[in-house]
Image (tube, helix red, strand yellow):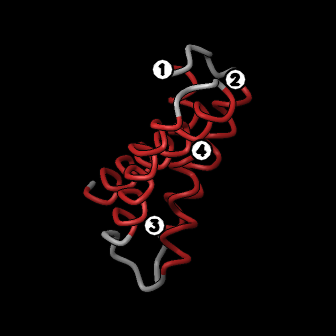
Amino acid sequence: MKTFAIYAATALAEIAGCFAFWAWLKLDKSVWWLVPGMAALALFAWLLTLIESEGAGRVYAAYGGVYIAASLLWLWVAEGKQPDHWDISGAMVCLVGTVMIIAGPR
């Protein structure tokens, strides 16, 4: 459960940081959006180091599924665009992969 909480916080930090750049470049927001955006991206990188694993690549691979699901949640909550059934189905497939990577016997 701790791992999932860290992955969820990591996804929020990464998406918020990337969205700051999106807002600046695509939505004509102030360049000052980059200050909290870069802080969020630094937080994202640090949070990934808190995951217990034998290798960074496995952490990143498992995180990918969480990122995809969290991105669709961001789409819905922050941008007001509801994901369709293809989005949700794809995210579910990715989350199954995440669970396999995290919980697989080693």
Residue extending farthest to the right is 86
**Residue tagged 3:** 102
What percent of the width, then of the height, locates residue 87? 69, 31
Q: Mark 4 falls on what kind of element?
A: helix
The foreground one among 68 and 91 is 68
What percent of the width, then of the height, locates residue 33? 47, 36
Which callout, 2 or 1, points at the residue further toward the start of the chain?
A: 1
**Residue tagged 4:** 68
Disc 3 versus disc 2: distance between alpha carbons? 26 Å
Q: Mark 2 falls on what kind of element?
A: helix
Which callout, 3 or 4, points at the residue further toward the start of the chain?
A: 4
Query: In the picture shown, does residue 24 fall above or below 61?
Result: above
In the rendered structure, the answer to whether residue 9 lies left or right of residue 79 reads left
Residue 68 lies in quadrant: top right
The foreground one among 78 and 31 is 31
Query: In the picture shown, does residue 45 fall above or below 39?
Result: below
**Residue drawn at 27 percent across, 54 percent down:** 1
Disc 2 versus disc 1: distance between alpha carbons? 16 Å
**Residue tagged 1:** 77
Amino acid type of disc 2?
His
**Residue tagged 2:** 85
What percent of the width, then of the height, locates residue 104? 49, 72
Disc 2 versus disc 4: distance between alpha carbons? 14 Å
